[in-house]
Image (spheres, rainbow, N blue to C red):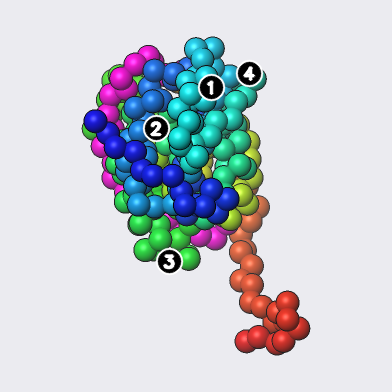
């Protein structure tokens, strides 16, 4: 039986890590996933924010039932499906942690990697703003693997973001940087390039994909393919339009004293 971590000592205190879980029709997968997240982050101050993206299977009700005795768990709901990027952003805007970690709600991402991603980000220092998971041994269909490989190669060639797999849901990002990123639909697939645009670096961490327990993917390939091409060139344009990153030093502090 998977053990749960105890409630945070001070429910009003900001956690160190906020885990955002976008989910659409994942009522069957979420109970086990939430328990795994809690077990993985045991001993840390954390919160889990599930964002129900207009589900029709009672996802929000399932999560609401799991909140009893778990003050670190909350659920936000979109009345209609708005897409995975919108769900991630809704969770980000509600997050209170210094680090925001993302993980897909279908259970294909293993929560056991969350501590390693957070630790890799913290160890990398302030010049690094993201630890990005990169999937190995994907359990997707052959067609989906090929489509993803092509998309990643095209994206990498155009954006030069140094990321083999930008579509992996496992990421840990410094919240203050995350909030600065320009938002648009499909934004979650370009986070490495957008973080680089802000002048920060990225560390990568290999993760092993796993099979979902129930259901099937709600976000298809072809419904994002053509818009993805437009978004790709949009992100390229955004990066071209910001060639110089300001290096800011404090001259006069809030106390009125000069600083060097």
Q: Does label 1 or label 3 sit earlier along the sequence?
A: 1
Instruction: Write the residue at 59% across / 30% down.
Output: 76
Disc 4 packing (10 Å; few <14; some 14–19; many ≥20)? few
On the image, numbered disc 3 is attached to which residue? 125
On the image, numbered disc 2 is attached to which residue? 34
The span from disc 2 to disc 4 (Cα, nearest Å) is: 23 Å
User: Which quadrant is home to the N terminus?
Assistant: top left
Please report the bounds of the magenta region as a residue range: 197-219
* Horizontal arrangement in the rendering, residue 63 relative to residue 81 (left or right): left
* Horizontal arrangement in the rendering, residue 20 relative to residue 145 (left or right): right
The reply to whether discs 3 and 4 touch (Cβ–Cβ < 8 Å) is no
Q: Position of residue 11 (x, y in %)?
A: 53, 48
The reply to whether discs 1 and 4 touch (Cβ–Cβ < 8 Å) is no
Task: Classify 239 as above or below 67.
Answer: below
Q: Which secondary structure lies at badge 1?
A: helix
Q: Does label 3 or label 4 sit earlier along the sequence?
A: 4
On the image, numbered disc 1 is attached to which residue? 60
Determine which of the numbered discs, if any, sits on residue 80 in the image.
4
For the residues carrying marks 2 and 3, which lies nearer the camera in this image? 2
Q: Does label 2 or label 3 sit earlier along the sequence?
A: 2
The reply to whether discs 2 and 1 touch (Cβ–Cβ < 8 Å) is no
Q: Position of residue 136 (x, y in %)?
A: 26, 37
Instruction: Write the residue at 70% across / 79% down.
Output: 253
Task: Classify 156 as above or below 220.
Answer: below
Q: Nearer the viewer, residue 128 or 163?
A: 128
Q: Position of residue 155 (x, y in %)?
A: 46, 39
User: Which quadrant is home to the C terminus?
Assistant: bottom right
The span from disc 1 to disc 3 (Cα, nearest Å) is: 37 Å
Q: Which secondary structure lies at badge 3?
A: loop
């Amino acid at each position: 039986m998977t053990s749960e971590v105890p409630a945070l000592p001070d429910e009003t205190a900001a956690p160190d890590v906020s885990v955002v879980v976008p989910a659409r029709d994942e009522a069957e997968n979420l109970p086990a996933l939430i328990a795994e997240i809690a077990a993985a982050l045991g001993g840390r101050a954390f919160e889990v924010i599930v964002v129900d993206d207009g589900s029709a299977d009672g996802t929000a009700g399932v999560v609401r039932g799991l909140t009893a005795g778990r003050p670190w768990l909350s659920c936000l709901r979109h009345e209609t499906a708005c897409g995975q990027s919108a769900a991630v952003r809704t969770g980000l805007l509600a997050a209170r942690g210094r680090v925001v970690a993302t993980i897909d709600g279908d259970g294909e991402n293993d929560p056991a990697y969350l501590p390693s991603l957070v630790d890799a980000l913290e160890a990398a220092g302030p010049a690094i703003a993201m630890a990005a998971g990169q999937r190995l041994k994907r359990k997707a269909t052959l067609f989906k693997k090929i489509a993803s490989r092509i998309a990643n190669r095209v994206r990498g060639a155009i954006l030069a973001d140094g990321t083999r797999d930008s579509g992996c849901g496992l990421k840990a990002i410094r919240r203050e940087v995350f909030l600065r990123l320009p938002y648009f639909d499909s934004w979650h697939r370009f986070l490495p390039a957008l973080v680089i645009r802000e002048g920060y670096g990225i560390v990568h961490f290999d993760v092993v994909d796993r099979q979902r327990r129930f259901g099937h993917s709600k976000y298809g390939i072809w419904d994002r393919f053509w818009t993805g091409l437009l978004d790709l060139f949009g992100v390229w344009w955004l990066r071209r339009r910001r060639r110089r990153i300001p290096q800011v030093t404090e001259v006069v502090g809030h106390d009125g004293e000069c600083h060097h």
